[in-house]
Image (cartoon, rainbow, N blue to C red):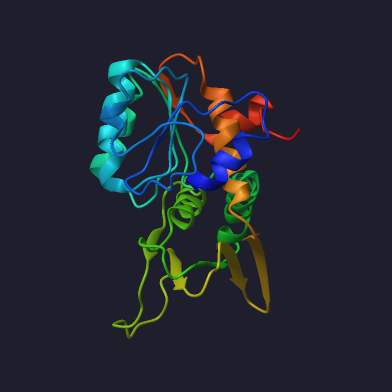
Amino acid sequence: MGKVISEMADENPEIEIAAGIDVRKSGKETYPVFSDISECRDISADVIVDFSAPQAVPSVLEFASERKIPAVICTTGLNEGQLSLIKKTSETVAVLRSSNMSLGINLIEKLASEAAKVLSDAGFDIEIVEKHHHRKLDAPSGTALEIADCMNSACDNRFHYVYDRSGKHEKRDPLEIGISAVRAGSIVGDHDILFAGDDEVITISHMAYSRKIFARGALSAAVFLAGKSAGYYTMADVISAGKETGK
């Protein structure tokens, strides 16, 4: 993702990369690259974009808070403690978090929420199937969980999530959302939301063909967040502001 973001930033006159953080430097970067964010003390920047790993997020948030630099957190697989830390940090500096930076996914969350409100009351079962490349570490994906949370919130949080039925020998609970993960090959990211009723199935699907859609969304979020006052922001705020790059 760092490489893709770098390439797309070069094409955007609004953006200049001040520095990068990567333990594996390629040597091809046109800007300084450090192995740890703490080494960036002398770097001046308007916003931080984080596509790292859960264990790195606390140090990114600490740096953002100390330097009062807004941060776009794109890392997935975060635990409850790390999510709480993001909310806490947003009290002192602007923080935008999303499990998926794609404009399409953020629209699908809205569509799925509206569908869930109507179809769950009509007795439809809800299932999410997500597919990613075999190098992805967390499962289910943060995007699948975010979609489920959006639907559940729209339905007064009456659903619970089921990730594995291998040990179950019982009828499906109508108040569950099933979430299944596939890890195979080089799949960038596919998400299907199935609403299955008697004699009909409605599917909302999103397929990512390139990591560029995530990089584009992250850069849009960075442009939006630069200069913002302290607070917790999401991609919905970016979309509402009409700051999607390429428009």
Choose between 130 and 170: the one closer to the eye.
Answer: 130
Q: Quadrant of the C terminus?
A: top right
Return the residue found at the far right.
Answer: 247
State the image coordinates of residue 163 (x, y, percent, origin top left).
37, 69
Q: In this view, does 177 lie to the left or right of 117?
A: left
Nearest to the observer: residue 105 or residue 75: 75
**Residue 173 image point, x, y percent:** 41, 71
Q: Which residue is drawn at 49% across and 39% down?
A: 29
Q: Can residue 236 be seen in this view?
A: no
The answer to whether residue 36 shows anywhere in this view is yes
Q: Is residue 90 left or right of residue 241?
A: left
Residue for point 37% across, 67% down:
162
The mark tally for this picture is 0
The answer to which image quadrant residue 170 occupies is bottom left
Q: Is residue 225 above or below residue 110?
A: above
**Which residue in the rendered view is the most extreme toward the front?**
27
| 68 over 148 or under it: above or below | above
